[in-house]
Amino acid sequence: MSYIYLALAIYFEVLGTLCIKDSNGFTHLKSSFFLFLYYGLSFICVTLAANKMDVSLTYPIWTGSAIAIVSTLGIMYFNEPNNIFKILSLALILLGLMGLTLSPKV
């Protein structure tokens, strides 16, 4: 169940971050409202996930996954610059997340 909460936290974090772009400096009220709603839901879900998981695993997965997803969506849908350095950096984030997830508990 913790991984479901973590997945939901990542999902809401991504939605909230995308609303930042659309809120246009809090001038669009609907997007601004959803920004706070999604971030609130994200924090609730990550808190529920952290109750059963190590915070040293929960937090990096939450933030790292959101960074990778938002960066990819920025390239795909917002025509943000794309280069080999950015792609390699995203790959390193994902590699680090896999390492944290697969590392044995001592």
Image (tube, grey):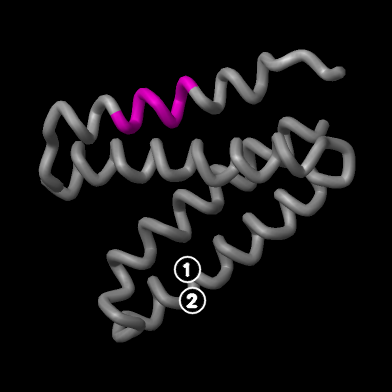
Query: Which residue is at the front of the view, 12 or 92?
Result: 92
The kind of secondary structure the magenta stretch mainly shows is helix
- Give the quarter of the image for residue 38: bottom right
- Give the quarter of the image for residue 77: top left
Q: Do residues under tags 1 and 2 come within 8 Å of each other at their CB atoms? A: yes
At a point 68% along the width and 59% down the height, the residue shown is 43
Name above or below for residue 54 compared with residue 35: above
63 on left or right of 92: right
Write down the region rendered in magenta.
Answer: 89-95
Q: Amino acid at mark 2?
A: Phe
At a point 67% along the width and 14% down the height, the residue shown is 102
Q: Which residue is mark 2?
A: 33
51 on left or right of 87: right
Mark 1–mark 2 distance (CA, rounded to whole Å): 5 Å
Q: Amino acid at mark 1?
A: Leu
At a point 29% along the width and 36% down the height, the residue shown is 72
Residue 10, percent from left and from top: 56, 43
Per the image, label 1 sits on a secondary structure element best described as helix
